[in-house]
Amino acid sequence: MSTLQVNVPDSIRHRVEHFAQADGVSVDDFVASILAQRIAAADADSYIQKRAVRGSAGKLIDLLAKAPDMPPEQADQITETGEQGAGGNRE
C-alpha cells in the first residue's frame, strides 16, 4: 500500500466522513473503495470504446435482417402511450 495525500474542500471531507461512518468503514477504506469504483468505470468505458471501433453498422444490419419477423412477446410490447405490456417489469 502507498499513501496518497489529497486536499479537498471541508464540505467534501465532511460528506466522506459521514458516508464512511454510515458504511461502518474507515475514511481511508471508503475513499479507496470510491477510487476503485471510479477506475473500474473508466476501464469499462475504455473497453466499450475500443470494442465500438471494431464494430460495423453493416454487420449489425445483416444480423438484424436474420431476425424473424414476428411481434414481440407480450412482456416486451410497448403500447402507443409508451406503457410496457403486462408482465413487462422484470426487475
Image (tube, rainbow, N blue to C red):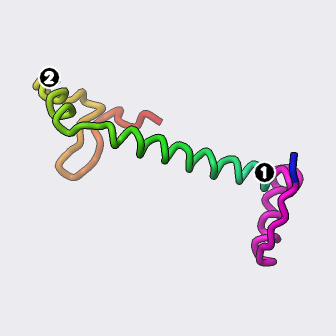
Marker disc for residue 74: none
Cα separation between marks 1 and 2? 47 Å
Q: On the rendered structure, is 1 left or right of 45?
A: right
Could you tell me which residue is drawn at 28 percent across and 47 percent down? 83
Which one is nearer the viewer's eye here, 78 or 42?
42
Magenta stretch: includes residue 18: yes
Query: Could you tell me the amino acid type at mark 1?
Result: Ala
Could you tell me which residue is drawn at 23 percent across and 42 percent down? 78
State the image coordinates of residue 32 (x, y, percent, origin top left). 78, 51
Q: Is residue 86 above or below residue 25?
A: above
**Magenta extent:** 3-29
Residue carrying label 1: 32
Which one is nearer the viewer's eye here, 37 or 3?
3
Magenta stretch: includes residue 5: yes
State the image coordinates of residue 41 (x, y, percent, origin top left). 57, 48
Earlier sequence position, callout 1 versus callout 2:
1
State the image coordinates of residue 34 (x, y, percent, origin top left). 71, 53
Residue carrying label 2: 66
